[in-house]
Amino acid sequence: MKRDKVSLRKIFLPLLLAYLLLSVACKYIVLPEGVKIGAAAGKGSIGWSAVATNVGKSASGDLHIDLTIRNGTGDWSAMTAMDGKPAVLTAGGKSINCDKVFVSTGGHRLAPGFQMGSYTGGSKKEPMTQPIFVECPAAETAPGAILTIPYSYVTGQYNYYEQDKNKVESSLTIELDQVTTDIAYPVFEDVEGLIQKADIEIVAINKVILTLTDVQRTDNGLQFTWNTFNPGEYPTYVHIGTPPVIGEDGVLYGFYETPDIVSVPITPAGGKAEWTTEVAVPQDVKGFYILLSVETGKARLFANYAIDISDQ
């Protein structure tokens, strides 16, 4: 009997020790620097939402619905209506497919808590301001009408090698009885620590320091001067693309290109580099924020910054 008790202790004690170690390990996990649990969708994420800003008729007589889209994901996010899936208008007990759907961030990642009503579309050679709207052929609205738009979105940093990481499919539901006309763009909800001052020093890839050294109004829009300082022993590139801006009119200005393909000068070891980017904006629009993507951590991985230049 004593031998059996001793044998049980020998088996039980190592198992108990393993359990305790595993329990402690589960409670105290050391993550790599910069990695946060649950950061993909953001704390309190509700996804994207939208409000109707106008319900009327198009030139051809179709029902025309202007929209403002809002990033409630809690993180930087790009969204677009899903190809091949129409919006659906439900009104007066009937459902109608609406195939003319222009609902998107234009490829850009919008800051959390920001909202927009238009973006730069068209082509790089012939850009155009694209309003966000849906049109429904030969349709009429009615009390209690609902517009449903299937869409997808991604959150977090842009990674060339994992462009669809954190992709979510969902749908927007807009009550057309509630038309909102007094919208203050671009911020609808303050996010603590999001908006940065124009003189911020950003640590980019290979610990290179990126700064915005000048902002100028030009005949066509805004010109930004960027400076990098490389404290390392090897020359390096810091890609930032051509940063877009969004202002008090709710238009996200700047034709979208993936930031890694836009040419930048090399920053020599122990030295500096300087270059400019430009974005076309109307002269009478103010209250701008730069939506900046900076190559950070590793090649083709971009962190996002909302830079306040609302005084320009």
Image (cartoon, grey):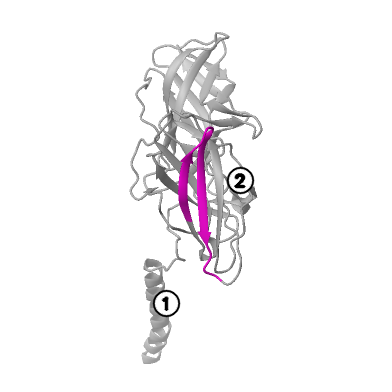
Q: Quadrant of the C terminus?
A: top left
Badge 1 density bin: few <14, some 14–19, many ≥20, Cα 10 Å = few
Query: In screen coordinates, is 250 left or right of 220?
Result: left
Residue that numbered label 2 is attached to: 258
Q: Quadrant of residue 34?
A: bottom left
Quarter occupied by the N terminus = bottom left
Residue to which mark 1 is pinned: 18
Point out the stretch of residues depicted in magenta.
211-232
Label 2, label 1: how far apart the Cα atoms are: 49 Å
Q: Is residue 66 above or below residue 150?
A: above
Asked whether residue 107 is in view, the answer is: yes
Instruction: Note whether 209 is above or below 83 in the view shown.
Output: below
**Residue 12 versus residue 69: which sits nearer the camera?**
69
- What is the x, y in percent for residue 88? 52, 22
Q: Main secondary structure of the magenta part?
A: strand
Image coords of residue 173 (percent x, y): 44, 27
For residue 123, what is the image quadrant?
A: top right
Where is 143 relative to 2, above or below?
Answer: above
Q: Give the camera-side residue of 83 and 179.
A: 179
Q: Secondary structure at mark 2?
A: loop
Dot 1: element: helix
Task: Identify the residue at the far right of this view.
Answer: 125
